[in-house]
Image (cartoon, rainbow, N blue to C red):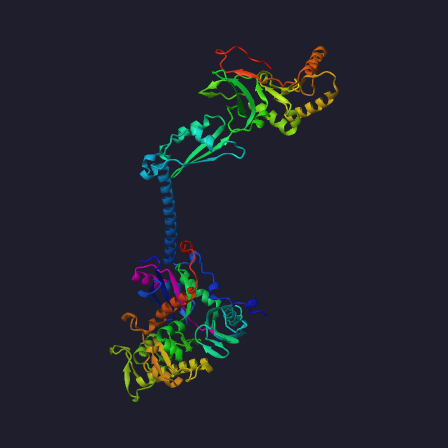
Amino acid sequence: MSQSLVHAPQARSWRDIPQPVKPRVMSRGGRWRLAASLARVLAFVAVVIVVAWGAWEVIAALRANPSNMPAAARTVPVKNFVLKTNADGVLDAAWLRSALGLPKGATLMELDLQQLRARLLADGQVSVASLTRNFPDTLEVRIAERAPVARLQAQFGDGAERTLLVARDGAVFPGHGYDTARIETLPWLAGFKLARAGGRFAPIEGVNVAADLLAHAQLDTPHLYAAWQVVSLARLASDREIEVQTKTGTTVVFGAEGDFAVQLAKLDFQLELLAKATAPVAKINLALGREVPVSFVAPLAAASNTTASAAKPAKTAPAPFISLFPNSQSQTKREL
Amino acid sequence: MSSSTTFIGAVEIGTSKTTVLVGEHNGRELAIIGRGECQSRGVIKGSVVDYKAASECAHAALEQAERDAGERIDLVFLAQTGAHLEGFYNEASVSVKAADNMIDADDIRTVCDLARSKELPAGRMVVHNIRRPFRVDGRLVPGTPEHLVGQRLEVGYWTVHGQEQRLADNIHVIRGFNLEVRELVLASLASGHMITSPEERQHGVLAIDLGAGTTDYALYRDGAAHTTGVVSVGGTHLTNDLSIGLRLTENQAEKLKLRFGRANVVTKDKAQKVWLDGNFAIGDRQFSQQVIEQITAARAVELLEVVKKKLGNAFTPETCASGVVLTGGTAKLGGLAETAARVFGVPAHLGETPTWVSENLRDPGYHTSLGLLYYGVAAQAEKNTGVRRRGGFLTGMKRLFANA
């Protein structure tokens, strides 16, 4: 037998006797000592808490009033910019540098973090931003980015037409860092008035409803979503309806109050039924509940369309045009 | 004061008095800085029979010692005595497992575990495991046998065990003062460590601590404790004999014992009388000094013979070259050394307090408490040898909360 496998039983030792006793068994001196020990522990805990609180206060004071910082900490220029964004975010450190627009050689203590934060939020693509000084030379920025659900084209004061993106909450932003292919999959947004408020675009109302519809379509019927070209909010406020114009010229009307998943299923079914129809479909109305009226293009118009389409290559519907400065430009405004 | 300084209380709850000494230990040196005493109550033959009375007395002594020292005691070394303590010897041997017959740490650990593995009856607990020197192929090895070459490694342990309830009672008396008992030390080992030198222990010596209720003894051989024991007879029995023989109260008998008692009879004249009080007041009486000496000597001889009988074959004059050393309150009885020498057949003398002990602690009654401090500190140091200290701060915090 190997000696290392020997496990000799050990007899119980006096050390196995439990030593703790109840306070009532203690004498007055013992209880006094117990109270003193507890007081010592409490005092120690209190000291730790006070020290921690003091340290926190000092840090907070230094953050609030940079002039209290040691001179050495104030003279080091910012060298590193750390950007932390959400998982599907597209913004990078280069954008951060340009967005912040810091002067060369600026130190951490010279930065007005509130102002820089406002500068970041002014972009529209950033929904939340927080900035932290990490001494001696690092500025850490944490942001949350908005995700685009649609796009729009607007004409600015200089006459230039630019594509803007719209987020679920209606925020309008230029959209930095997005892949062009991704942008082109987004439908155009129409049927609203774009206005400025406080130097930036005012949020568009009703986009969240359209965003729900688009999200359902992307997930449930991606083949239908791919054919959607324009989403109009023109009748949302008045009739609680959203109009979608497809690339084939069909207008689909969705009820904003109904279940989008059900309406999309109906649409898919109707389109399958209508696949063999001789005349092209002009409009499908899904906003009337069980009834789904479908209107067709008149045969003559259809024929001319057919001829025209045969004569020249297919052309996708143009983007809706929105003028921000109707008085300075022509009154041109394309209707859906 | 250094943060690593520990204030140790050495507590002896004896039959006649409870003694507390406070030692200031800084890791290297031990200084005695306080003392507290209280006449014992609720203790008979070293065992607590009245918890409340014994606690009050012990706590009073502890408070007095803390006041005297001006410091709070951190932990306690507690002396243990009583007739419930018993001992036995158990040995084990192993074959050295290495091919080259060199003994390694595993061999030593295995043989030690085997030698200590004797099971105890229900309700008994180990107080001490005293290791005797190793033997390699029958050859005595005073130190560690590691790296020595041999085929067979042997070791034996003298295991002292006691009754669980009695041990717990003593510990709870101290815990009632919210103090941790860090070491439980046999009174005989504590006093023996104090009154014998390492050379004496190497040559063989018998240390006898004659207390009021018990007599503790420790026989040393080859530098280590060989056998220990407790006889539940002490100074109070001499007092009791005088009280019965001369028809006196216990207080009167105690007074006569302290003044005229001897362990041998030296008075030749039967007519030589001594006064009980000596103030010639009413009730003061005369007694024959020879009779007093005869009574006390008879009991002293009997007591020493009981010790010798209990030692049995472990004690022989040849293996106890340094003789017998006596201590304890009853050792102050005149002629005890001569009587012990006659009974054991070896030289005997009263234990002397080391010269570095202050004058007020030189009484034999403090030998156990003094030994407790030094034996306890040495035992702790031995336990910590080679053990790396970890998490000093965390350990300190843990102790702080554990104490609370």
The part of the image, by quadrant, that contains residue A108 is top left
Q: Is residue A259 visible?
A: no
Q: Where residue B394 appears, x then y in whole percent?
A: 42, 54
Residue B130 belongs to magenta span: no
In the displayed structure image, the side of residue B100 where residue B5 appears, left or right: left
Tell me the residue at 29%/88% (across/down).
B271
Q: Which residues are magenta?
A: B59-86
Task: Pinpoint residue A64: horizontal percent, then vertical percent.
Answer: 36, 34
Residue found at x 57% / y 20%: A189
Towards the viewer: B116 or B381: B381
Residue placed most toward the observer, A302 or B268? A302
Identify which residue, B103 or A7, lies in the foreground.
B103
Q: Eyeballing the image, is B138 above or below A206?
A: below
Residue B80 drawn in magenta: yes
Quarter of the figure that contains the N terminus of chain A: bottom right
At 54% across and 33% down in the image, what residue appears?
A: A88
Residue sitting at x 37%, y 46%: A46
Report the number of discs. 0
Where on the picture, by quarter, is residue B299?
A: bottom left
**Residue B178, percent across and down?**
40, 58
Residue in front for this viewpoint, B301 or B159: B159
Question: Is there any visible trace of residue B107 in the rendered image?
Answer: yes
Residue A77 spot, x, y in % from top left: 37, 35
**Quadrant housing the C terminus of chain A:** top right
